[in-house]
Amino acid sequence: MKINSLIALVLMLIISACGGDSNHQKSEESSGEVQSMISEPEDPMENWQDNKGIGPVSSVELGEIDPEIAAEGQKLYEELCTACHKVNKKFIGPSPKGLLDRRTPEWAMNMMLNPEEMIQKDPIAKQLLIEANGAPMANQNLTRDQARKILEYIRTL
């Protein structure tokens, strides 16, 4: 009788040990379902070609670089932008070198002309604010013409 009880107890322990993973497996399955329901946040930098930013500039046509306009833009850049931007490296703000390889010309001009709203609403500008440790781009109160000249200079970098 004792042997039968002992065998029954061992069998119950084996069976319960085998079934123990089913709860864990269900938990993992449920967790996977929850994770698949939560979408990954979209990388704002990924589709930068589609982003023209927020502001007065909706279209910019770029032809060949105009050296006179670029020279005027360089003066403006050196006066207004070098406190935060260095040509060949990230400083407080990103380097302008190769800017048009990662931003549309419209986005760049809107960032120059409308930085406050861009930082509040534009996903790329928000990300750049984080990367700049919360240091927002200063509004230099540029005219559209001045912003275009600076953009022309940036194209020469």
Image (cartoon, helix red, strand yellow):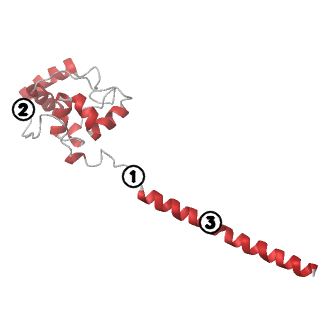
Label 3 residue SS: helix
Amino acid bearing label 3: Asn
Q: Label 2 crowding class (10 Å Cα cut-off): few <14, some 14-19, many 20+?
A: some
Residue 40, which numbered label? 1
**Could you tell me residue 5's position as x and y percent?**
88, 78
Q: Label 3 crowding class (10 Å Cα cut-off): few <14, some 14-19, many 20+?
A: few
Q: Earlier in the sequence, mark 2 or mark 1?
A: 1
Is residue 30 visible to us here? yes
Q: Earlier in the sequence, mark 2 or mark 3?
A: 3
Q: Earlier in the sequence, mark 1 or mark 3?
A: 3
Q: Residue at (47%, 62%) from the top-left corner?
A: 33
Q: Residue at (12%, 36%) from the top-left corner?
A: 57
**Could you tell me residue 118's position as x and y percent?**
24, 34
Amino acid bearing label 2: Asp
- Marks 2/1 in contact by CB < 8 Å: the verdict is no
Residue 66, which numbered label? 2
Horizontal arrangement in the rendering, residue 51 relative to residue 3 (left or right): left
* Farthest top residue in view: 79
Disc 3 designates what residue?
Answer: 23
Q: Label 1 crowding class (10 Å Cα cut-off): few <14, some 14-19, many 20+?
A: few
Label 1 residue SS: loop
For the N terminus, the image quarter is: bottom right
**Could you tell me residue 157's position as x and y percent?**
20, 32
Q: CA distance from mark 2 to mark 3?
A: 69 Å
